[in-house]
């Protein structure tokens, strides 16, 4: 019983951090549409949503996906990224999107713009979808 008593407060703290992260992203009511990667327009369609339970979800050019957001804002770390397995002409663009998304480590939200970046200078720019 002592272990359970000690673990529950820590779990509550972790959940608060996740909820605060979601709030920082404005996630509950926004879908982010990818505009560019490393300054180049992203011609395919990719959407990103931050769910209230500390997870991300979205639609890549061919498949829907989800994963866990493992770091509090402004840090960005996606773990456990999974996607459906449909094939389409956009699979190369989808692979590029997933590789870039997993490599991001920092985030910034300014109005209707979300920027993800990493220490190597790579950057993804999203706009809030209407």
Image (cartoon, rainbow, N blue to C red):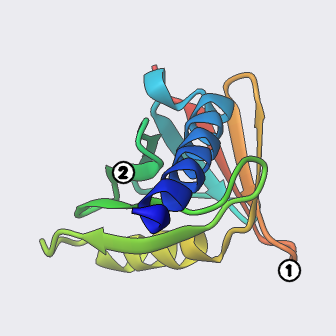
Q: Position of residue 19 (x, y in %)?
A: 56, 36
Which residue does the image show at 48% across and 73% down from the upper left?
79
* Residue that appears at 64% across and 77% down: 103
Q: Is residue 114 above or below residue 102?
A: above
Pointer 2: what residue?
57
Q: Quadrant of the C terminus?
A: top left
- The reply to whether residue 46 is in sight is no
Q: Position of residue 102 (x, y in %)?
A: 56, 74
Q: CA distance from mark 1 to mark 2?
A: 25 Å
Residue 119 makes an appearance in the image: yes
Write down the quadrant of residue 24 in the picture. top right
Q: Earlier in the sequence, mark 1 or mark 2?
A: 2
Classed neighbour count for the residue bearing mark 1: other residues with Cα under 10 Å, few (<14), some (14–19), many (≥20) = few
The answer to whether 113 appears left or right of 130 in the picture is right
Q: Residue 12 versus residue 80: which sits nearer the camera?
A: 12
Residue 118 location (% of width, % of height): 79, 70
Q: Position of residue 71 (x, y in %)?
A: 66, 60
User: In the rendered image, which quarter is residue 53 located in?
Assistant: top left
- Nearer the camera: disc 1 or disc 2: 2
Q: Is residue 120 left or right of residue 103?
A: right
Q: Where is 81 relative to 117, above or below?
A: below
Looking at the rendered structure, the secondary structure element under dot 2 is strand
Q: Which mark is residue 120?
A: 1
């Amino acid at each position: 019983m002592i272990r359970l008593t000690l673990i529950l407060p820590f779990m509550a703290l972790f959940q608060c951090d996740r909820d605060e992260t979601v709030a920082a992203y404005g996630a509950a009511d926004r879908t982010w549409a990818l505009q560019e990667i490393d300054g180049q327009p992203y011609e395919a369609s990719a959407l990103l949503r931050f769910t209230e339970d500390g997870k991300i979800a979205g639609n890549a050019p061919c498949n829907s996906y989800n994963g866990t957001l493992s770091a509090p804002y402004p840090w960005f770390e996606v773990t456990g990224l999974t996607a459906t397995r449909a094939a389409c002409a956009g699979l190369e663009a989808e692979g590029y999107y997933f590789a870039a998304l997993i490599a991001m480590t920092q985030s910034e939200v300014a109005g209707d713009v979300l920027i993800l970046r990493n220490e190597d200078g790579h950057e993804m720019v999203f706009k809030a979808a209407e």
